[in-house]
């Protein structure tokens, strides 16, 4: 096996594979599955430390399709954030990869999504956003734009919820939007999201080939390929490679991460969107909202100083799951002291 | 003058919610306790922060009875709104201590009426009217101390303990108690008060503690490391006390050996707990009926995906919002079968505060041993009131972490199938996320799955798993607390009860026996029911199932379990929201004994 075929742990890409997908042929979600595998492989994530969490829906089936050597939990509809948060508290060393959909997050799971952002659970949270409920055969979801037409002619009557905008306003430290068909951008974003300590949202537009892929649909492949307006070209350089890369060619913004890794953002026109500037992030989101002709993708907002939940809770190095009686039970004297208050 | 009644009466304090009488009431109760006399206080409070009427009962019982009596021998009336009713409630020959400002309409001549100028007496101590109102409560502590013959030194010590660490407040309160006491001595003749507390030695080695505090301490000692919760009456103090204890006893070198997350709702509470339990933490939540309803979907997920969790339900009056500060045992059937589909849970039914402490530890062992949510049912009466309890034992046994395979053990086995019954007890083996072994990883799901945790829609594979889970839960009787037998086994009149109902039933059986009605009893402590319950029912001519709900939820569970028992099981029910009294039980059983009802 050549060096390029194995990662820092000596694992091959196939060690990150999962079961065969049962989604429709050509589904955007399967692209994301491949991108997760690619990212985990290149970042040398230890599969045994991976926890894959999801709710219910087409997107939520996908954790079975990547990293079979990780631990999966496909929970209940819209409630994956609480399950992921609990697991993360039990063992803070787990790498939590959450996969959700637009129905699972923006409707039934909106509350849990907001609160996981607020608590800053250390996890990657990918929304595979196709604007429709696939498993129940094509109803509009809350991320679908008002006025959009779907197969059969139905028109969506309600305005969409922009999950990135919600996340930014709730103080999320890592907010990105991407397109499942842009593997290069997605892999870089997933790698950076894994490295980020805290809640990292990637709202990934992922077309539903069966129910929402009309040529004029802003969630369709054709439209996205033509109207994807990239904020920048995203690259991720891990800490162990960061030393050897000293000069970044061209007009590039280097965004340092606390562990020594960095995100490189290369300009595609005269300006580079700086994700560490929250006002700039808000402007991008506002432009995206008003400009019906484009979807803006890239790293929208990044705050390297966000404090993850396990730090807020002062969790120690040894996972809660491994503590035993001697570490958890107060001694006899302390016990007698507690009882004293009740005599 | 009526004959003196020693150590057998109830003092009722009628005040306004939010007026700060809780400290005074606790001081009175604790003083009796410290005098070695069994005492049981009950706070009957409204769902309100301030303004509505509230009553506090202090039952003094040398015999150790702890249920509400329903009678009021000594009443302290401070609430203008309810004074007429409170004066009328005093038992003939009883004593009324009343604020003179509201005593105008009292005309009873069959009780002793002691009018006390509360406001005037506290005036010198507090120019601030708010403080004056708070301190007025200490006046009745003093008056009661004099009239009932409470030990003065003990009262002062209890006041000091109540406000420990705040010396000025201790001194001020002690002075006001003294003023009340001296006023009473100068104005009334304590010798004429027929109700007296005399010191005994009956509470040594006993605790005086609320059920919710006992549950929290049990969780701490039982190794709970994660609590996900949402505030709801009457359960909030379980989690608050647990967090308080954990901050005190689980912080080492700045590292917290516990995590507490206040959730956005009860759905998230149980989601958090299941996530933590799945990843290997001993995790719990505490809630009440409305929270249980919200947890339904996750409860089924925990059951089917086989994830340990402890859910404490401090029951209150339902349905819907019901009466949030009143007590019932109304969640038995909903917890037993919580969630859609065929679901059946392990339910623990502690009867008394020491059992709450024991079972809240054991719940974590059971949850991990059986890899399933375990429901521990307490109620508002036990949870939020102080009770006497046997001194809690320091746990000697190690935690039972159940069948968990680590990397070393996996190296010894050829295969691992998450949902396979290897030992014939229906309990599979599990691994924890983060285990470094190629056999360990598996995929947990609430959808149909095979023994190897793979997705399936195959009929046989599906049935194999759900049938095994049923066997597993049924088998939990091996480890859940067995029912307690009481009375002569040859007696054929049975009384079946559980939880806080115990206190009224124990007293009621003594009363019935005195009336010539002999009974035997069985106290159920867990569901699924143990075989002894079936034997008990079959050994009786009639079984009275006593419980605090409208429908007789346990009676129905027992009827389904015991073939042919429908005709011999009779429901003795009380569901009005107050703690159950022995007389309620006696009246219903006596009536049926005289003229058997048709079921």
Image (cartoon, coloured by chain):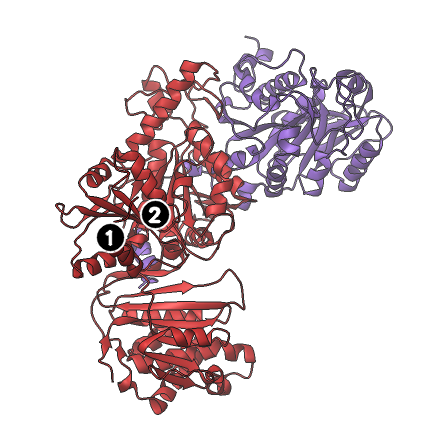
Say if B15 sits above or below A266 in the image.
Answer: below
* Residue farthest to the top, as pictured: A1
Q: Which chain is red?
A: B
- Asked whether the residues under marks 2 and 1 belong to the same chain, the reply is yes
Q: How far across and how far down the image is residue A215, in percent?
A: 80, 16
Quadrant of residue B167 within the rendered picture: bottom left
- Read off the residue under disc 1: B595
Percent x, y for residue A170?
A: 68, 43
Residue B39 position within the rendered picture, expressed as x and y whole percent measured from the top left: 29, 66
Along the horizontal axis of the image, is A331 left or right of B306?
A: left
Q: Quadrant of the N terminus of chain B?
A: bottom left
A61 to the left or right of B495: right
Let me know if residue B388 appears in the view: no
Q: Secondary structure at mark 2?
A: helix
- Residue located at (26% from left, 33% from top): B563
Q: Colour of chain A?
A: purple
SS at badge 1: loop
* Relative image position of residue B224 (x, y in whole percent): 39, 43
The residue that disc 2 covers is B221
Q: Nearer the viewer, mark 2 or mark 1?
A: 1
Q: Residues within 10 Å of mark 1 (few under 14, many from 20)?
A: few
For the residues marked 2 and 1, what is the alpha-carbon distance in whole angstroms? 50 Å
Identify the mark nearer the N-term, 2 or 1: 2
**The disc label shown at residue B409, or none:** none
Question: With B531 as the anchor, is B120 left or right in this view?
Answer: right
- Residue extending farthest to the right is A270
Q: Is residue B233 visible?
A: yes
Vertical relation: B536 (above or below) A239 = below
Looking at the picture, does residue A171 appear above or below residue B382? above
Q: Residue at x 30, y 88 (%)?
A: B189
């Amino acid at each position: 096996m050549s060096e390029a075929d194995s990662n820092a742990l000596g694992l091959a890409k196939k060690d990150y594979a999962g079961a065969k997908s049962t989604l429709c042929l050509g589904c955007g979600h399967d692209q994301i599955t491949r991108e997760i595998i690619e990212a985990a492989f290149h970042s040398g994530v230890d599969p045994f430390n991976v926890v894959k969490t999801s709710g219910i829906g087409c997107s939520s089936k996908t954790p079975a399709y990547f990293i079979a050597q990780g631990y999966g939990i496909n929970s209940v509809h819209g409630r994956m954030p609480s399950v992921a948060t609990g697991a993360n508290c039990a063992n803070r060393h787990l790498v939590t990869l959450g996969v959700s959909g637009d129905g699972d997050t923006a409707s039934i799971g909106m509350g849990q999504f907001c609160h996981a952002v607020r608590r800053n659970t250390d996890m990657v949270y990918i929304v595979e956003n196709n604007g429709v409920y696939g498993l129940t055969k094509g109803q509009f979801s809350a991320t679908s734009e008002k006025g959009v037409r779907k197969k059969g002619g139905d028109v969506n009557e309600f305005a969409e919820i922009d999950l990135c905008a919600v996340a930014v306003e709730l103080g999320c430290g890592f907010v990105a939007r991407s397109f499942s068909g842009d593997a290069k951008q997605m892999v870089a974003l997933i790698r950076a999201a894994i490295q980020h300590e805290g809640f990292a949202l990637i709202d990934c537009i992922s077309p539903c080939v069966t129910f929402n892929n009309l040529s004029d649909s802003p969630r369709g492949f054709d439209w996205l390929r033509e109207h994807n307006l990239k904020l920048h070209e995203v690259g991720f350089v891990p800490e162990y490679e960061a030393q050897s890369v000293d000069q970044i060619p061209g007009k590039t913004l280097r965004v340092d991460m606390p562990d020594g890794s960095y995100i490189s953002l290369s300009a595609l026109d005269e300006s580079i969107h700086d994700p560490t500037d929250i006002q700039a992030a808000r402007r991008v989101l506002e432009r995206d909202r008003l400009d019906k002709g484009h979807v803006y993708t890239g790293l929208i907002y990044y705050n390297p100083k966000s404090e993850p939940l396990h730090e807020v809770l002062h969790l120690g190095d040894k996972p809660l799951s491994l503590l035993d009686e001697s570490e958890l039970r107060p001694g006899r004297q302390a016990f007698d002291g507690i009882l004293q208050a009740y005599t | 003058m009526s004959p003196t009644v020693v150590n057998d009466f109830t003092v009722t304090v009628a005040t306004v919610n939010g007026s700060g009488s809780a400290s005074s009431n606790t001081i009175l109760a604790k003083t009796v306790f410290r005098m070695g006399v069994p005492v049981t206080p009950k706070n009957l409070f409204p769902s309100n922060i301030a303004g509505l009427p509230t009553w506090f009962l202090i039952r003094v019982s040398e015999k150790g009875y702890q249920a509400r009596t329903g009678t009021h021998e000594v009443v302290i009336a401070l609430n203008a709104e309810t004074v007429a009713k409170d004066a009328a409630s005093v038992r003939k020959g009883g004593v009324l201590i009343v604020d003179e400002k509201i005593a105008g309409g009292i005309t009873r001549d069959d009780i002793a009426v002691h009018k006390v100028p509360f406001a005037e007496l506290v005036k010198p101590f507090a120019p601030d009217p708010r403080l004056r109102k708070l301190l007025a409560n200490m006046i009745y502590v003093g008056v009661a101390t004099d009239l009932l013959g409470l030990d003065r030194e003990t009262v002062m010590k209890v006041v000091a303990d109540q406000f420990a660490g705040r010396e000025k407040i201790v001194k001020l309160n002690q002075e006001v108690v003294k003023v009340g006491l001296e006023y009473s001595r100068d104005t009334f003749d304590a010798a004429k008060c027929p109700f007296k507390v005399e010191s005994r030695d009956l509470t040594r080695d006993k605790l005086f503690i609320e059920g919710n505090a006992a549950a929290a301490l049990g969780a701490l000692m039982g190794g709970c490391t994660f609590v996900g919760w949402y505030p709801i009456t009457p359960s909030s103090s379980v989690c608050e006390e647990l967090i308080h204890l954990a901050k005190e006893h689980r912080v080492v070198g700045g590292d917290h050996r516990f995590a507490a997350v206040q959730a956005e709702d009860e759905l998230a509470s149980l989601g958090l707990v299941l996530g933590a339990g799945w990843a290997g933490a001993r995790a719990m939540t505490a809630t009440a009926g409305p929270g249980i309803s919200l947890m339904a979907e996750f409860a089924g997920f925990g059951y089917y995906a086989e994830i340990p969790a402890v859910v404490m339900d401090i029951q209150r009056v339902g349905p819907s919002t019901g009466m949030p500060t009143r007590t019932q045992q109304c969640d038995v059937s909903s917890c037993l079968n919580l969630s859609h589909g065929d679901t059946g849970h392990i339910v623990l039914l502690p009867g008394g505060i020491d059992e709450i402490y024991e079972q809240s530890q054991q719940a974590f062992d059971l949850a991990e041993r059986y890899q399933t949510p375990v429901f521990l049912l307490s109620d508002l009466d036990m949870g939020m009131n102080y009770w006497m309890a046997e001194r809690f034992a320091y746990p000697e046994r190690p935690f039972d972490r159940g069948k968990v395979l680590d990397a070393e053990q996996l190296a010894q086995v050829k295969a691992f199938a998450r949902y396979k019954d290897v030992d014939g007890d229906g309990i599979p083996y599990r691994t924890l996320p983060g285990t470094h072994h190629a056999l360990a990883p598996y995929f947990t799901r609430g959808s149909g799955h095979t023994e190897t945790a793979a997705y399936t829609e195959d009929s046989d594979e599906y049935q194999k798993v759900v049938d095994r889970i049923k066997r597993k839960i049924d088998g939990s009787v091996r480890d859940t607390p067995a029912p307690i037998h009481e009375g002569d086994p040859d007696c054929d009149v049975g009384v079946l009860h559980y939880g806080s109902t115990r206190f009224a039933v124990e007293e009621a059986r003594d009363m019935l026996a005195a009336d010539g009605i002999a009974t035997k009893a069985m106290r159920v402590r867990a569901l699924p029911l143990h075989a002894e319950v079936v034997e008990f029912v079959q050994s009786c001519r009639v079984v009275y199932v006593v419980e605090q709900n409208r429908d007789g939820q346990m009676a129905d569970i027992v009827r389904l379990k015991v073939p042919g028992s429908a005709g011999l099981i009779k429901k003795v029910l009380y569901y009005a929201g107050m703690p159950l009294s022995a007389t309620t039980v006696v009246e219903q059983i006596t009536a049926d004994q005289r003229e058997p009802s048709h079921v």
